[in-house]
Image (cartoon, rainbow, N blue to C red):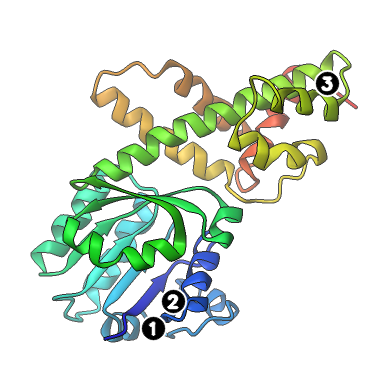
Amino acid sequence: MAKKIGWIGLGHMGLPMATNLYNAGYDIHVWNRTIEKAKNSGLPYKESLTELIKEKDIIITMLFGSESVKDLYQKIFETGVSIKGKLFIDMTTIHPDTAREIAEQLVKKDADFLEAPVLGSVIPAKKGLLTIVVSGDEEKFNENMDIFNVLGKAIFYMGDYGIASTMKLINNTVLGSFMAVLSEAYAFARKVGIDPQLALTVLENGAGKSLVLEAKKEKLLKEDYSTHFSVNLIHKDLTYALDLAQRNRYPVLLTSVTRELFNSAKAYGLSDKDFCAVLEVFKTLSNYEE
């Protein structure tokens, strides 16, 4: 029997991911809290959450963070629709505690849950080249590898609930720190009069060589802060990571500083801009002007 998928969340990542599943031939309908996004998505959509939950066997959520996920699942439970036997896959980057909490609630209602946050931003999402880390029942994971293979190029089974979210947060401590140090180095080079294009070319052939620089080189040069992955999102992820580190008595010195740099970017009104906008923090700190 063909898999019937309901997709919830049509942000910068959710829309291209849902589109990939639709283009792959899946029976998919979308729903979004702001229904206009669903209507304008170009994808089949449902007007109500209740209708979506009732008709679909697999529900995939791709939202902002823990609070939005908790709120959405509470709304699902409040629909009164039986979810027995349905599979829920959350691909949001959430706190591991939230993943465990949602899993417990769903299992109590005889539903299944896979926690499957993704590594990558808009461009790999559009190309189906995300990296996906998954926790939950291994049998359910294997049964749905076809879905993950449409969305990503590298899929890793991580084990019990909470582990995938923890790994995603660890990954994003590296991501945030890379973006911060690349921005610092780029602003440093400009401050001392080195040609910006030349500086980034040297970095990408030297110590700065990374997927982050590859993805953000042109955005830095053009100071193009159109959003692929927002300041708000990286700040949220680093905050979750710091909470985990504190609980485990692990000293995350670099991550702490990085989180505060993105906090500064938020203070400068850059919350909804791409996280490469942290460059503006270094420009301000160094009093650099063109």
Q: Residue at x 62, y 51 (%)?
A: 228
Q: CA distance from mark 2 to mark 3?
A: 46 Å
What amino acid type should be assigned to the residue bearing mark 2?
Answer: Trp
Q: Which residue is mark 3?
A: 190
Where in the figure is residue 93, as x and y percent of width and height? 39, 48
Which one is in front in this view, the residue at disc 2 or the one at disc 1? Answer: 2
Which of the two residues, 243 or 146, is positioned nearer the viewer here?
A: 146
What amino acid type should be assigned to the residue bearing mark 3?
Answer: Arg
Q: Which residue is mark 1?
A: 48
SS for tag 3?
Answer: helix
Where in the figure is residue 115, as x and y percent of width and height? 28, 54
SS for tag 1?
Answer: loop
Residue 15 vs 55, above or below: the answer is above
164 relative to 279 in the view: left or right: left
Snapshot quadrant of residue 145: bottom left
Residue 146 vs 47, above or below: the answer is above
Crowding near the residue tagged with mark 1, few <14, some 14–19, many ≥20 C-alpha atoms within 10 Å:
some
Asked if the residue at tag 3 contacts the one at tag 1, i.e. Cβ–Cβ closer than 8 Å, the answer is no
Where in the figure is residue 113, as x and y percent of width and height? 22, 61
276 relative to 43 in the view: left or right: right
Crowding near the residue tagged with mark 2, few <14, some 14–19, many ≥20 C-alpha atoms within 10 Å:
many
Snapshot quadrant of residue 109: bottom left
Asked if the residue at tag 1 contacts the one at tag 2, i.e. Cβ–Cβ closer than 8 Å, the answer is yes
Q: CA distance from mark 2 to mark 1?
A: 7 Å
Q: Residue at x 68, y 27 (%)?
A: 183
